[in-house]
Amino acid sequence: MSRASSVLNEAQKIVSNLSVEGGTLHPEVQAEHDRVVADLAKEFPQVAKAVKWTYERRNYPHFDQYARNESRGGKITGEIKIPVFGKDQPLARVDREQDMANKKGVMVPGGLRSILAHEFGHAVNHHIIRHGDDALKDEWFDKKREIADDFAVSEYGKSAINEGVAERFAAEFMGQAPRKLIPIMHSYLERATEK
């Protein structure tokens, strides 16, 4: 099996690490989720393996989140929760609702894809911290502080260093900003998982 097909097979397994509370996703939303997660898994397989994706049906405003969860036998170390309002909403409506929930310029635009990438940026950050030794963690924290102002892409990203990392990650992943942070994250991930 070639390296490319091996990575693709692994990405397909990761896509299936999904739960939907209260039913199923609209086929368009499911397809977009699968595309985004497969793209993320191809570039960050070690992180994607450690994430569970959960869509929660909510009748009230509830924000997406990345939650660290260390109690899953070492396999799943985090969960990304995405709110879905109503039943069986097509992708265009989900995208519109996600973008309308944010004032223009406050967060990286892009609907569901942006939200998934943003939360995955938190997962990459957490993976570096969880798997790095103390020296690498200190270096990573210093690097984030050093680049915070230069890499800011949204108002929300300016609110906290980790939000800035997640916003910049989303913007770069979606092609809305030059890739500067993602290569840095790759270098830290390589060093964090060497041990």
Image (cartoon, rainbow, N blue to C red):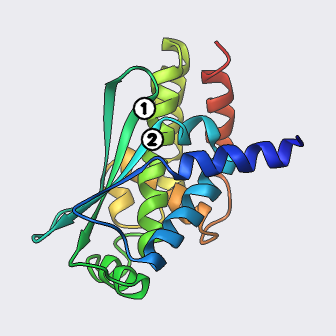
In percent of width and height, residue 86 lies at: 20, 78
Q: Secondary structure at mark 1?
A: strand
Residue 167, quarter of picture:
bottom left
- Please say whether residue 110 is visible from this viewpoint: no
Q: Secondary structure at mark 2?
A: strand
Amino acid of disc 2:
Val
Q: Nearer the viewer, residue 154 or 94?
A: 94
Question: In the displayed image of the protein, which residue is found farthest to the right?
Answer: 2
Say which amino acid is labelled 1.
Ile
Given contact means CB atoms under 8 Å apart, are the residues at marks 1 and 2 in contact?
A: yes
User: In the visual, does 36 lie left or right of 27?
Assistant: right
Measured from the top left, where is residue 8 in percent x and y? 73, 50
Report the residue marked by disc 1.
76
Q: Find disc 2 in the rendering and name its residue.
A: 51
Q: Position of residue 9 (x, y in %)?
A: 71, 47
Q: Quadrant of the C terminus?
A: top right
Q: Is residue 27 at all visible to an observer of this figure? A: yes
Looking at the picture, tell me which residue is in the foreground, 179 or 76. 76
Q: Residue at x 44, y 57 (%)?
A: 118
Instruction: Please tell me how crowded label 2 is: few (under 14), some (14-19), or many (20+) other residues with Cα within 10 Å.
Output: many
Left of 113 or right of it: where is 23?
A: left
The numbered mark, 1 or 2, whose residue comes first in the sequence reads 2
Q: CA distance from mark 1 to mark 2?
A: 5 Å
Q: Is residue 132 above or below residue 182?
A: above
Residue furthest out toward the left? 60
Q: Quadrant of residue 44?
A: top right
Q: What residue sits 47% from the left and 50% below the top?
A: 120
Foreground residue among 151 and 190: 190
Q: Which quarter of the image is occupied by the N terminus? A: top right
Q: What residue lies at 47% left-to-right and 53% top-to-bottom?
A: 149
Mark 1, Cα crowd under 10 Å, few <14 / some 14-19 / many 20+, is: some
Q: Position of residue 3 (x, y in %)?
A: 85, 41
